Structure formats: structure tokens, C-alpha cells
Amino acid sequence: MPRTTKVDSPGCPPLRVLTFDVLGLVKVIEVRDRLGGALQVVERWGVPDSSKSVLAASMNDRRIDPLLAVARKNGMVEVLSPINGDARASFSNINDGEEPDSDVITGLHLFQKESPDSSRLCTLLTCTTKGNASIKAINFPDKSEESAVSSMKTWRVTGGGSVLCSKVDGVEQHALFGGKGVELNVWDLENSTKIWTAKAPPKNNLGIFTPTWFTSATFLSKDDHRKFVGGTNSHKVHIYDSSAQRRPVISFDFRETAIKAVTEDLDGNTIYVGNGSGDLASYDVRTGKLLGCFLGKCSGSIRSISRHPELPIIASCGLDSYLRIWDIHTRQLLSAVFLKQHLTSVVIDSNFTMKEPVVTPRENEVQDFSGTDSNDETTDSDDDEEDVTPKKRKKAPKKGNGASQKSKGRKSSKKLKG
């Protein structure tokens, strides 16, 4: 029998999370208890279909008119409303004559820069496995019209290999790409030019060269595009500084399975790493030392990690069909929910707020604002009625009965003495 450890879940603060799975479903999970509650599924958008599996998702988490972009396996890209799930626009990323599985989307980013008419326009960055990257502008029409999609820029990220991961920095001026046979490279989005390319690590002590295979990557800071981290299929984590050198400045191993998800913290000094065996841990990028592993074993590969922009929590999901919420300080599991399908991505709605319940008077309660209390009047009238009605006198006990009882008691006492 395997060893198991029971971990108590104290509950998490009010939260709203959106998950995406292999059947194309979008599920909304919320926590509405202020004192620490459990995750509950409140909405489900879409119809189960394996051809509409969600490969990538990105959210423009603004307070007014937020947007959610979803890339599916059949080549469709949809822009939804994260509030109610209504479709705002959709387009196909597949050229004529191509099969959907030949060049699927692996990277998707919804720009958060507000345009002069941000309510009618949004900008998307997409990248496929063959390295075809493009920036497209979508114009939201009226209900009677169709959405207009215009390609602003298109370029080729790599000439060979497969692109498996991409990330846009916080300023949204640079993008990071990597994959199988593709070294990490940084591009300037404004000019569509490559400004930096990583160099493969040298051979090990035995003279064995490990082929390039990046599975996840992210920037360490929103303001600095020169520092970033990448996870490989050979369970290694490489930390780069493009201003220092082309090879990693720090490298370390994490367990024995492939790295599947890497996410940065808000401080820029901590990263969260998840692998294919369900292990989740935090590392200090300045020293490469392990800060600690998160309590509670996941039984499947972790595919996505999301950091809350305000609360000290992270959300993780993967192939074990569980959504988990963790505390980054204690690394304790706060809450978990089983969602039935294999999960591919998770995003957090940071603008979710709890509405205070409105207290209304009951129907049977009547408020009297005249200054007199109706209850006092009723009690006074009741007292008057009691004074009017005559009271019955109690009958006094007969003397004979009392004397006979005393004589019986004396006789019984005499018998006991004799």
C-alpha cells in the first residue's frame, strides 16, 4: 500500500477561477465565503467535444469590459466575455487546405493595452508549433454584423523544430519562444525582430549532449525582459540573463520528470515549478535553492500554474482533473475541487468582489414609526380584560379528611414499632 498523508484544508478567501479542459469546456469556480470556504462550480460554458480541446487561454483582466481569449484544437480562436461566457468574436487560424492537427496553436496572448476604442477592438498574439507567429486586431461589430479580423504582423519564429511555449512580458513589448529543437529566443514585437538567442548548454562529464527541449518559459519580472526562466523535458530549470551571457546563469534539477509549468512570483525572485509527476515547489532564482515543496501530492501532471495578483495564493491544475488553491507562504493546500475532465489551463479573475447581502424586513413584522409601541397597547388591554373577569376562589380542604389521614399515619407507625 502506498503511503498517504492527510492534509487538512482550511479553506480559501473569496475567489473566482476559470478552468479549461480537453473537452473544450470552460468552468467557473467560485468561493463566496469570507471566512474561508470551499471551491464550488457555479457555471459551465460549452458542449463537450474533443475536437474543441482548449490548448491555450489568455485573459484581459480589466475592471470594465474584460475579455477572455481561447485557442482550440480545431484551429478556432474565440474571444469571450469572462463574466457570462458570451461569444464576442471568433476566427480560424488555419489556412486553406491545411488540416487542424498539422499546425496547432501553442501560444496565445491577449494584449491589455487600451486602445482609443477598447470596447470595440482587441489585439491578439498567436504562435503555432511550426513557428508561425502573428499579431491580429479584432473589431467587435454590432449584433447584425460579423467580426472583422485584420492581420497586423506575421513572422517566422524558427526554421526548424516545434514551438511548445511562449510568453509576453509585462510591458507587452517583447515575447519569448522555445520548444523542441528551439532554443529560447526573445523577439521585439514592435519591429518583429529577434534580439537574443540562447546557446545550448555544454556536454556533461560523460560527454553526453542533451538535446534542446523546452516545455515552459516565463519572464521573471514585468518590467525587465532580460531575465527569464525555462523548464525542459529533462527535468532541468534554466535561469537566463540576456545582459550577462547566452548560456544559463543558474541551472538545477527538479525531481525526475519533465517540467510542465513555470510561473513567476510578484517579487521577481521566486518561481513556482510543476512537473509531470504532480510535484509542485518554489525556488529562489537568485541562488537556485529550493524554498520548499507544497503539501499534498497531486496524482497527475501539472499543466498550468497561475499566481493571484493581489492575494498570496496560487492555483494549479493538471491531468488529475483537480483544481487546487495553495498558500504561497505556508505552502499548504487551501481548497481543491474535482472537475471530471483533464485540465489544460487556469486563469484567475482578480476583480471578483463579494456583494453584501441586502437585509429586508420580514413580511409578518410591522414597523410602527408613530412613537408608540403597539405591544404595550395590547398588554394594557389584556390587563384591563383580566381585571374585569371575576376570579374563582379555591375550595379549602375539609378538616375531617385531614384528621383521618393523621390517625392512619399514627396507626401505621404503631404497627411498625410492634
Image: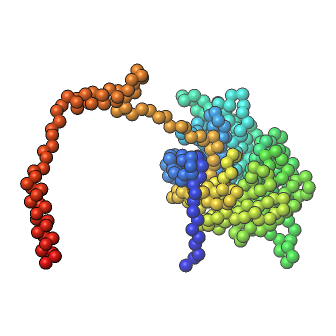
Q: Is residue 65 visible?
A: yes
Identify which residue is drawn at 39% across, 34% down: 362
Is residue 86 something one can see in this rendering?
A: no
**Based on the displayed image, in which of its 4 quarters is residue 410 positioned?**
bottom left
Which residue corresponds to the image point at 13% horizontal and 78% vertical from the top-left? 418
Q: Residue at point 57% right, 59% down?
A: 9
**From the viewer's perspective, is residue 277 above or below residue 195?**
below
Q: Quadrant of residue 172?
A: top right
How far across and how far down the image is residue 123, in percent? 70, 38
Q: How is the image coloured?
A: rainbow
Is 395 situated above or below 116? below
- Percent across and percent down for residue 228 are 81, 54
Between 78 and 61, the one lying in front of the other is: 61
Q: Nearer the viewer, residue 365 or 123?
A: 365
Q: On the rendered structure, is 158 left or right of 313? A: right
Q: Could you tell me residue 159's position as x and y percent?
A: 79, 55
